[in-house]
């Protein structure tokens, strides 16, 4: 699979694992810029332009969460994948809260990592298209991840909130299949991903609360429905 234009910022402090991942990706024509700690990776980010970031969570000098926060403060578009041995729900949710788009639990297969990278880059292409939606009294700018209610100040959405709201709008007044959206946005439909999606649905409900004509309902056993009455 040729990927000559895909440049990856890779931060991983385990030299043996880093070498395997780097060589495997480069054998498929990715360009991989590897760093052994978060601080070095951030310095590289400030100087170079990357298509995607693949970050270990536990690293010296600067952990993956802090690195992702700093990257996201400067670049809202770059996809971020976390590599982590942590599997607690709160750890996964923290990764999404600081700006991560996906995560892989160690140990993982290289094929799975490559699929996740391509999926995130495909989503990025969709997001950069010019799309703005009217939703009740709200205006939702998908590429800019902004939600505006009437004349009030814009509310900034996270990557995950924006994509979830986009799919709800695309299926407005219809059931958005839970398994489908988990596979589409989280990459799998396991317990941790399901808990994460429930949290993001709750956040969207709060951000849409100014307009009583809008409601996100849970259709038990099937998924969610965005209703505009």
Image (cartoon, rainbow, N blue to C red):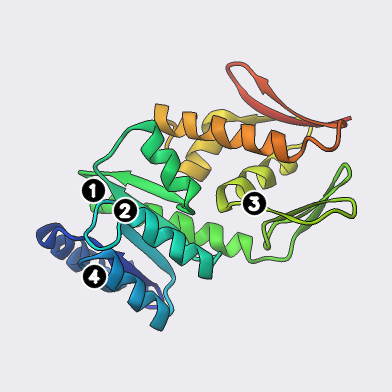
Q: Which mark is residue 113?
A: 2
Residue drawn at x 48%, y 29% as measured from the top left? 195
Task: Name the secondary structure under disc 4.
Answer: strand
Labelled pair 3, 2 in contact (Cβ < 8 Å): no
How far apart are labels 3 and 1 at the CA level? 31 Å
- Residue 157, given in percent of the width and then of the height, sits at 64, 51
Labelled pair 2, 4 in contact (Cβ < 8 Å): no
Residue drawn at x 73%, y 43% as measured from the top left? 170
Other residues around mark 4 within 10 Å, as few (<14) / some (14–19) / many (≥20): many
Q: Is residue 222 above or below residue 154?
A: above
Q: Which residue in the structure is indicated by mark 4?
A: 35
| Towards the viewer: 82 or 61 | 61
Q: Is residue 122 above or below residue 89?
A: below
Q: Which residue in the structure is indicated by mark 1?
A: 109
Q: Which residue in the structure is indicated by mark 3?
A: 157
Other residues around mark 2 within 10 Å, as few (<14) / some (14–19) / many (≥20): some
Q: Is residue 151 visible?
A: yes
Quadrant location of residue 229? top right
Q: Which mark is residue 7?
A: none
- Residue 79, given in percent of the width and then of the height, sits at 47, 60
Labelled pair 4, 1 in contact (Cβ < 8 Å): no
How far apart are labels 2 and 1 at the CA level? 7 Å
Q: Earlier in the sequence, mark 3 or mark 1?
A: 1
Query: Of circles 3 and 2, which is in front?
Result: 3
Quadrant location of residue 6? bottom left
Q: Earlier in the sequence, mark 4 or mark 1?
A: 4
Q: Is residue 46 above or below residue 28?
A: below
| Towards the viewer: 77 or 94 | 94
Residue drawn at x 39%, y 52% as measured from the top left? 116
């Amino acid at each position: 699979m040729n990927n000559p234009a895909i440049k990856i910022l890779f931060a991983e402090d385990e030299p043996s694992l880093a070498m395997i991942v780097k060589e495997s990706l480069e054998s498929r024509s990715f360009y991989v810029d590897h760093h052994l700690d978060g601080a070095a990776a951030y310095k590289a980010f400030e100087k170079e332009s990357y298509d995607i970031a693949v970050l270990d969570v536990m690293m010296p000098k600067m952990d993956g969460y802090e690195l992702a926060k700093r990257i996201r403060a400067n670049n809202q578009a770059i996809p971020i994948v976390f590599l982590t041995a942590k599997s607690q729900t709160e750890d996964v949710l923290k990764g999404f809260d600081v700006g991560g788009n996906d995560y892989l639990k160690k140990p993982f297969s290289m094929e799975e990592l490559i699929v996740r990278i391509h999926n995130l880059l495909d989503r990025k292409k969709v997001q950069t298209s010019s799309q703005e939606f009217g939703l009740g009294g709200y205006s939702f700018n998908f590429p800019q991840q902004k939600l505006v209610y009437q004349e009030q100040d814009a509310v900034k959405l996270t990557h995950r909130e924006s994509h979830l709201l986009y799919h709800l709008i695309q299926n407005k007044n219809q059931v958005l299949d839970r398994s489908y959206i988990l596979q589409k946005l989280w990459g799998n439909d396991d317990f941790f991903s399901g808990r994460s999606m429930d949290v993001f649905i709750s956040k969207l409900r709060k951000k849409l609360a100014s307009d009583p004509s809008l409601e996100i309902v849970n259709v038990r056993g099937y998924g969610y429905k965005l209703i505009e009455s």
